[in-house]
Image: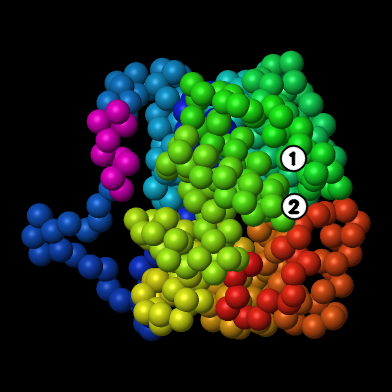
Amino acid sequence: MSLPELLSPAARVVASIALLCLCSGAIAAPYVPKRDDVVLARLPAGARQPQVQALRQQLADQPANLDAALRLSRAWIDAGRREGDPRFFSYAQATLSPWVQQPEAPAEALVLMATSLQSLHRFDEAQTLLTRALQADPGNAQAWLTKATLLQVRGNFAQAVAACANLIEIADPHVALACVASARSMSGALGESYRALSKLTAPDPNADDPQVRSWLLGQLGEMAVRLGDTDAAQEHFLAALAADPQDNYVKGELSDLYLRQARYDEVLSLLKDSEGNDALLLRLAIADHDSGTARGKWARMYQERLDAALRAGDMTHSREHARFLLEVRGDTAAALQMAERNWQVQREPADIRIYWNAARESGKSAREAIDHWVEENRYQDVTLQSSAHAAGTAL
């Protein structure tokens, strides 16, 4: 689930797994370079941007400057989402920590800290901070939107709608309705939500805010996919990318649409410069595998990142790992195990699909839990009703 940043023009929520260089076997002696000019590590590109450098210097000179801390934290979060590098979220947390630790912490600092934690799937901690933020500032629109998103991601749809309702008087009406519509679409009101949001987004809402517009159109596209209107979904996703070409959430959704239609060359074209983002690298690996080209480059790259994450005990991106295991490696048992682990954390459409498909490949007993959940929540998604997916077939 992506959401617009109401406080600053930040990009979508896309986090990737930290790549750790781990050595096997016995513990080696620490490496000591022989020369002072040996480079041990490089800062990510986003950390070297002039704007970021200026904010870092300003905060170093004025450590009590809350505005500088907030602006630097937003810059870190923006870079983390844009580049798919989780280190930036840690930088944001370090920047905000002195403020968040205060008994009466500023609401803005709490919301930004919650946002950075959410990007790393540390949902319980993020929820606690949002509660503090709303106690300090009940009219904080970004806090309500982030809370609603967290609740929806975790499958608490009724609570998410209630949180969204608080936005009606304090936020852009398009954002408020999109929040409500997105949550209601997950629990029996898909068609109604899609029609309502379609009327509100015509012809060109938020033309001065491309990221909000991209988010709204992305929500419409995702709903159209679940309704089975692939032409409308593609139109929404392309319009979203026209508004914000760097929206990685929309790139992933459009790639999945192309994968379902076996339009592999279009996936490769869309994502040709996206290997650094784990979620998009996964789509490249699936497109390469399903197209039968057998190049395997992207699968090897993703496998290396998966192996590093597993060695580190990092389960942040279990959804993507489960898809890779099912669709590229054809390891149904491992995919189901990973999908079930992911199911305990988040329940977005992509989470539902991978759990559904892994369970269907594993037999009747494995399907019972997800089948019951879909029925109980009146969840609608035509992609779940297609014929059973063989391992290696796109969701």
Q: Can residue 255 be seen by looking at this rendering?
A: yes
Identify residue for label 1.
Answer: 194
- Give percent across and percent down for residue 350: 66, 58
Residue at 41 percent of width and 51 percent of height: 85
Q: Nearer the viewer, residue 224 or 123?
A: 224
Indicate the amino acid at tag 1. Tyr
Secondary element at image label 2? helix
- Give percent across and percent down for residue 392: 58, 78
Q: Nearer the viewer, residue 277 or 56?
A: 277
Q: Is residue 243 magenta?
A: no
On residue 227, the disc is 2
Is 55 positioned to the left or the right of 137 in the image?
A: left
Residue at 55 percent of width and 31 percent of height: 213
What's the magenta bit mostly, secondary-structure-wise? helix
Note whether 16 is above or below 130 in the view shown.
below
Q: Dots 2 and 1: beta carbons under 8 Å?
A: yes
Is 180 positioned to the left or the right of 209 in the image?
A: right
Indicate the amino acid at tag 2. Leu
Residue at 75 percent of width and 65 percent of height: 384
Note whether 6 is above or below 90 in the view shown.
above
Residue at 49 percent of width and 51 percent of height: 251
The earlier-in-sequence mark between 2 and 1 is 1
Dot 1 crowding, Cα within 10 Å, few <14, some 14–19, many 20+:
many
Q: Which region of the structure is painted magenta?
A: 44-53
Snapshot quadrant of residue 316: bottom right
Q: Can residue 334 be seen by looking at this rendering?
A: no
